[in-house]
Image: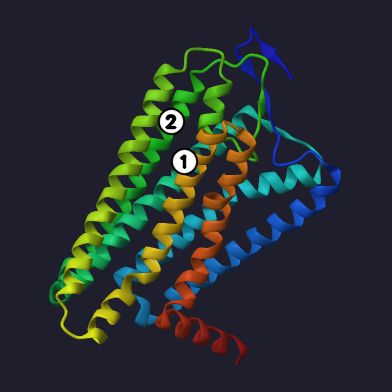
Amino acid sequence: MQTDNATRISEFLLLGFSEEPALQPLILGLFLSMYLITVFGNLLIILAITSNFHLHTPMYFFLSNLSFVDICFTSTTIPKMLWNIQTQSKVITYEGCITQIYFLILFAVLDIFLLTVMAYDRFVAICHPLHYMIIMNPRLCGLLVLVSWIMCLLNSLLQSLMVLRLSFCTNLEIPHFFCELNQMIQLACSDTFLNNMVMYFAAVLLGGGPFAGIMYSYSKIVSCIRRISSAQGKYKAFSTCASHLSVVSLFYCTMLGVYLSSAATHSAHSSATASVMYSVVTPLLNPFIYSLRNKDMKRALKAMFVKGTV
């Protein structure tokens, strides 16, 4: 590895999960399978929504955007990891690492924003059903997605520029299967106080803020459902947001588990293993959660396959 006055470096080493040669084919096959299922499953959801007129509603518009972001999210990290395993290399360039950080933060925060927008959509649908189509009009839906993209792009740009100001010395090994922001900051040999402040402030603002919005929306939803007199009406109202609530719980619980586990064990290896949950497993399970728990989605997928076989 080359250095220039101990500040400019050309590459990092991604240590991944295990250096045991016998485990590499197993890891390669496992992650390749999960990646293909994630891409194929989310792509099916996008195609089903775009091809079925009955699914051209705000709820499915946001879902198709979430599926697209999930594909991009996993594509930011998994292909590089698979390539490194296949070529028996651990190298990622400095530029590649910064690029990976940029897009990883972009799509992770976009996931959070879209889940928040979807919570607001469910709130309007259940608490203001008569005004739903007026409130959630196409202009507002497009604006919500556009604002989410702009805010996430600016945040990713800020975080990446903050990393560019850091100097790195000799320890260039990242105990992860991708370039994670916190790991990069820990490797720096220059002052990282400002980087940590920006990172934690963004985490509270862009992670905690949307989470509070989701919790507020669901508190209102629960209040509205309790006022419904019939048991069938309560079940129907809750079933419309059950899939979204499952995805929110999975995403936030896995991310929380990552940081709690790394804080408890102080092990970067355990943090890398836990990161698989929110960066790989959650995008993998999203299509199954929305398709298996949603009758409209199952009908759309069935119709799409029937058309394809005709």
For the point 60% across and 16% down, the residue is 168
Task: Please give the residue where the numbered disc 1 appears in the rendered image.
Answer: 105
Tag 2: amino acid: Gln
Q: Is residue 133 visible?
A: no
Residue at mark 2: 159
Which element is circle 1 on? helix
Which quadrant is the N terminus positioned in? top right
Residue 11 left/right relative to 196: right
Q: Return the residue found at the far bottom.
A: 310
Say which quarter of the image contains residue 199.
Answer: top left
Q: Is residue 110 visible?
A: yes
Colour pattern of the rendering: rainbow
Report whether 42 appears left or right of 211: right
In this view, the residue farthest toward the top is 5
Q: CA distance from mark 1 to mark 2?
A: 8 Å
Q: What's the mark number on residue 92? A: none
The crowd level at tag 2 (other Cα within 10 Å; few <14, some 14-19, many 20+) is many
Q: Residue at x 42, y 83 (%)?
A: 295
Going 34% across and 51% down the picture, which residue do you hit?
113
Q: Residue furthest front?
A: 264
Q: Where the C terminus falls, by quadrant? A: bottom right
Vertical relation: 279 (above or below) 309: above
The secondary element bearing badge 2 is classed as helix
Q: Residues within 10 Å of mark 1 (few under 14, many from 20)?
A: many
Observer-nearest of 158 and 174 = 174
